Image (cartoon, helix red, strand yellow):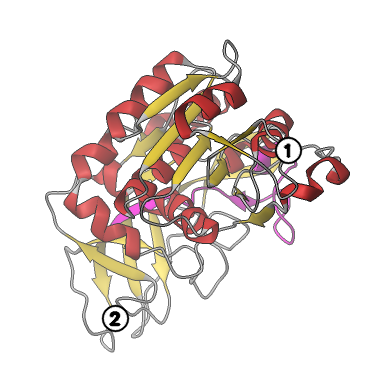
Amino acid sequence: MRSVRVTGPDRVEWVEVDPPVAGPRDVLLAMRACGICGSDAFYTHVGGIPPRQGATPLGHEPAAEVVEVGSQVTGLQVGDHVVVDTMRLRDGLLGSGGAQGALSEYVLVEDAAPGVQLRVIPEHIPWEVAALNEPMAVAHHAVRRSGAAEGDTAAVFGAGPIGLGAVLSLKSLGVGHVVVADVQPSRLEKALAVGADAVVRSDEEDVVARLRELHGEATDALGHAGKAGTDVYLDAAGVPAVVQDALRAAKHRAVLCIPAVHKEPVPVDFAQVLAAEVDIRLAMGYPSEIFEVTDAIIEHWERYARIISHTLPFERALEALTLAATPGAADKVVVTF
C-alpha cells in the first residue's frame, strides 16, 4: 500500500509498504480522511521522530471505515465509520512517532475495543469533518485545562483550527464572552461564524486596550490599574507577542493556558507580573477528551465544517502537506481518500 513518510530532513515521500494484517483481536481500518497538522511540517523539517527518524509515517487526524474485524473483537463491525484515539494504539502514537500513520491506505488497530481506540460515528457525518475530531480534542483539552466556566470572559489568540475549536468548546461551556485575536481578516470572519462574540485585528489594534473595552477594567492584587477583566487567555498562536500581551493584560489571578507549540524561547519578566498572580498552564494532547468532543461534532457538524478551508484527494497528499505548511495559504487542510 502507499504511505506518506518522512524520509529525511525536509523530505517527505510516497513509500510502498506491506499492508497490515489483522489478527483475531484486531481491527483493520481503511482511511477515509486525514487532517494535516502544523506538527507534520515540524516532523518533516527535523527529519522524523526518534526512534523512527528518517522513516516516520505521517498523519494523526484520521477518520476511517472498518474493513476487517478479528474474530475475538466485539462491538465493532465491517462498515462502521469511526474516529480514532491516536494516543492509544499499541504500536505507538499514530502519525507522531509510532509505527503507523493515517496518511496511508490502511491502519491496523491491535487489541481493538470500542471506546478505547475507536468510536463509531453516524454515517451522515462527512469524512472530512470527522477528521477534525483529533484537533478538536486538543482544543477541548486546553479549554478544560484553563478552568473556564459558565459566565467567564475569555480571549483566544490565534484563529487557526485549535483556536476555533477552543471557541466552540468555550461557548459550549457557557463562557459569557469570547474574543478572538488574529492578524488575518478571513480567520476572524470564521471565528465569528463559529460563535466568537468579538474579534480583534491584532496587527492593527491594541489588543489589551480592546480587551479592557470589551471585558471591563481591572487591577492586579496591589490595585494597579490598566488590566483587563478577562478571566481566561488561551494561546493558540505560538508567538511570543501573544504571551506578552496576555501577561500585560492579566488581572489578579487570571489564567493563561498555552496549547500552542512555541518554536523559540519566550522571554517573560516575572517581576512585572508577580502582583497579578497569573496562573500559567500548559495543555498537550487529550488525555481523556478525545471522544467527549465527538458528541459535539455529531450534534453540530455543520458548524465544525466551517473550520476546513481545503480538501485534497489522497493522490495529492504531498501537495496538501506543502499547502498546510505555507503561512497564510490555508486554514485547515484535510486529505480525503
Q: Which residue is mark 2?
A: 70
Q: Is residue 191 magenta?
A: no
| Residue 60 highlighted magenta (yes or no) | yes
The residue under label 2 is which amino acid type?
A: Gly
C-alpha gap between disc 1 and disc 2: 65 Å
Q: For this rendering, which residue is in front, 329 or 239?
A: 239
Q: Residue at x 51, y 66 (%)?
A: 87
Inspect this view and state whether residue 36 appears. no
Query: Is residue 209 among the parts visible in the rendering?
Result: yes
Magenta region, residue range: 42-65
Question: For numbered disc 1, what is the local secondary structure?
Answer: loop
Q: Nearer the viewer, residue 206 or 217?
A: 217
Q: From the image, state whether disc 1 or disc 2 is nearer to you.
A: 1
Q: Residue at x 26, y 70 (%)?
A: 68
Q: Nearer the viewer, residue 12 or 331?
A: 331
Name which residue lies at 81% across and 49% down.
274
Residue 293, numbered label? none
The quarter of the displayed image where residue 80 is located: bottom left
Q: Position of residue 150 (x, y in %)?
A: 36, 55
Label 2 residue SS: loop
Quarter of the image that includes the C terminus: top left
Q: Residue furthest top?
A: 204
Residue 38 drawn at (x, y percent):
57, 38
Q: Nearer the viewer, residue 208 or 221?
A: 221
Residue at image mark 1: 224
What kind of residue is marked 1?
A: His
The residue carrying pointer 1 sits among few (fewer than 14), some (14 to 19) or many (20 or more) residues within 10 Å by Cα, namely few
Q: Position of residue 175 (x, y in %)?
A: 37, 48
